[in-house]
Amino acid sequence: MELLNSIKKTMGGESKPPQVATEKKVEATKETKPVANKIKLGHVHMSGCTGCLVSVADNYLGFIKILDDYADLVYSLTLADVRHIPEMDVALVEGSVCIQDHESVEDIKETRKKAKVVVALGSCASYGNITRFCRGGQHNQPQHESFLPIGDLIDVDVYIPGCPPSPELIRNVTVMAYLLLQGNEEQKALAGRYLKPLMDLAKRSTTGCFCDLMNDVINQGLCIGCGTCAASCPVRAITHEFGKPQGQRDLCIKCGSCYGACPRSFFNFDVIPEFEAISEMIAGVLK
Ligand code: SF4
Ligand code: SF4
């Protein structure tokens, strides 16, 4: 018997009781905090820089709270070891698509087949952004020359423009997608109203540029000179002359942020008056 005990000790048999105790502790935590009806969330990385995923993570404990209570991260090549695109409720797609890369084209088509809601996360997925300037000719894939926003290859449900997109907007869209899929009728209606402008953006265009402000705001007599466009431009391509925005074409990276931020591009009277209620609801969800 003494020999048996000594062999168990040498082989690590002694460590078993604490392990059992740990398992019991985990079970106990699960019982005190039941989690049901989580949605399946995925991050699909196309031709992007991972900055959009960093923006997701920049929600800090808010992101952890979402993963605790509202969404399971079922796919993310950066964060989890799942190799193939699974069924998802919401796919956050980052980056544009290189149409000379067969695998990328197949991946985006597969994403559309597997996801109930496809979100273009960031300006590369929405508008092409900096990849609009790709011309190929670089080693070791000189033929990789054409990059398209995902909306040119598949139907996209929601846009979250921005380079990078704001962490708050990503958080809000994720919470609203949860309410849309799992909420009661009232919550579903509110989530639908919240998401509508971002769905309208997805229907509107796959190109983003300072010229959107020129064509659809300034030249329509809608500009009020508020300066929001200049504040939203990540490369400071917009200055204000005589109270009106001027774009420097050579600096513009075609991210579409300025049009998305402009209060005269779309002004949703269904949502803006509910700003406080929406803010309180999101804060409550993340408590
Ligand atoms: S954000 Fe819109 S309304 Fe405001 S200055 Fe720019 S173009 Fe004009
Ligand atoms: S002007 Fe600035 S914000 Fe507007 S599309 Fe160009 S880079 Fe983006």
Image (tube, helix red, strand yellow):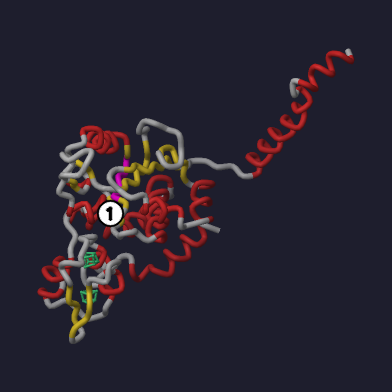
State yes or no: residue 144 in magenta: no
> Residue 216: percent from the left, percent from the top?
13, 68
> Residue 202: percent from the left, percent from the top?
22, 53
Residue ID at (39%, 50%): 53
> Residue 177: percent from the left, percent from the top?
38, 50
Could you tell me the amino acid type at mark 1? Tyr
Residue ID at (41%, 38%): 75
Residue ID at (34%, 46%): 92
Quarter of the image for the N terminus: give it: top right
Q: Tell me if I can see residue 202 in this picture.
A: no
Judged left or right of residue 241, residue 282 is: right
**Residue beneath disc 1:** 159
Magenta stretch, residue numbers: 116-120
Specify the principal SS of the magenta part: strand
Quarter of the image for the C terminus: give it: bottom right
User: Outermost residue toward the front?
Assistant: 139
**Mark 1 Cα-neighbour bin, 10 Å: few <14, some 14–19, many ≥20:** many
Q: Is mark 1 within 8 Å of ligand 2?
A: no
User: Outermost residue toward the right?
Assistant: 2
Ligand 1 shows up in the quarter that is: bottom left
> Residue 153: percent from the left, percent from the top?
18, 42
User: Outermost residue toward the bottom?
Assistant: 242
Between 160 and 10, the residue placed more toward the observer is 10
For label 1, the SS is: strand
